[in-house]
Image: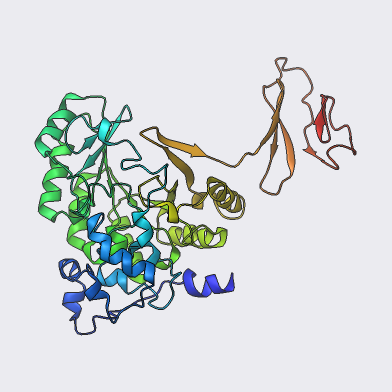
Amino acid sequence: MNTLDLDYRQFTLPGQGYWPDATPVQWNDWQWQMRNSIKSLEQLKGKIELTGEEHAGVLLANTKLAMGITPYFFNLIDPFDPECPIRGQVIPRIEEMTYAPTDMADPCGEDHDMPVPGLVHRYPDRVLFLVTDRCASYCRYCTRSRVVSGVGEQELELDFDRAIDYLKKHTEVRDVLLSGGDALLLSDGRLKDLLGRLRAIEHIEFLRIGTRVPIFLPQRITPELCAMLKEFHPLWMSVHVNHPRELTTEVRDALGRLADAGIPLGNQSVLLRGINDDPEVMKVLVQKLLRCRVRPYYLYQCDLIQGSSHLRTSVAKGLEIIESLRGHTTGYAIPQYVVDGPGGGGKIPLNPDYVVARTPESIVLRNYKGDIYEYPETAPMDATSPTPAYRRLEFLDPIEEREEITSRSWRAGRRD
């Protein structure tokens, strides 16, 4: 834990690293960052010692999901550590070309819930609006790898006019989430126009943006962008941070500008093998997020996207992590662990099992320490009846040491 505190808990300033000749104006220009993104094996030479698996993955990347890493984010990679939690998210590996039997091209079933191009309408009162196929950098576990980066097996068809017409007609929709790709890669003017068209629809009550730009490209979060976004409240934003090393000084300040603009911020992490599938790493992450005024929102089980099995970990590990947080840090820091039902089932919440047993009269629960408590299922019907005394149940040996603990049928360790 001392190592985690030293390496991850503090906000660091990575600097310009492999781009020392860039002027401060260039380095802080998000469009300069995009123009100078790492996209090829040639650009990696002299910057990182690739493993054989990474070398082969980079050569094949543009046949499936392009490689793209902003200079800023690239400087977070440890060039000598193959287990670096940053490089595992953005450096392609040959394992991406191996598909497990359970892998799917469209694991969330978005294509069959798309009534018009770019608009996914699955839940009754909200829609997902895909507005671009480009990202600041490309996550190797991307659930939309089939349509983003320009080299996937499908082309993301977009038709903003048809999408807006659909939303005008469907008055049950009250919530629109902009995603892609990444909506914050649109120019200020184009994004303002789109938000304005959505805000003009009377029954749409609030807007959301899902983005990883503040993490990959904090230079994009300019005062001008924040001032423009502030015009469209209520506007919410979900960011995507997987590891505490991603929360640098620049990212903290970018998130602060968004928060100061009145935008509520939530974080969506993906559980990834060897990257954040560790209770202590996740604890540092969620606590550091709160220091950035970001509420941990979801922890996703990695989708069954083709070529991602090397990054997936077990559901049991996810439950272990959530249980390690509950009671050991503030409730604000605990995300909801979810699995997207394969093929379009939507988000299914998963929680550790804190219910030991039920009777018609009470429920028996355990807390984060493993202590057992009984809670009455219903209040007494007769207000004049004496209030029953409930206390923590003392479980000794669950079979041999049977101590009667209440007047009900519960005894230590089993129910008669």
Residue 385, percent across and down? 78, 18
Where in the figure is residue 407, as x and y percent of width and height? 85, 25
Q: Is residue 9 above or below residue 325?
A: below
Placement of 77 over or under 152, stated as above or below? below
Q: Identify the residue shown where x is 17% and y is 60%.
A: 224
Is residue 299 toward the left or the right of residue 407 in the image?
left
Residue 127 is left or right of residue 86, and the answer is left
Q: Residue at point 30% right, 51% down?
A: 262
- Percent of width and height locating residue 213: 27, 59
Question: Residue at 85% across / 33% down in the picture?
Answer: 405
Residue drawn at 30 percent across, 56 percent down: 212
User: Who is closer to the viewer here, 88 or 365?
Assistant: 88
Is residue 36 visible in the rendered image? The answer is yes
Task: Residue 252: name its quadrant.
Answer: bottom left
- What is the number of callouts on the image? 0
Q: Where does the image place residue 60, in percent across and percent down from the top left?
A: 27, 61
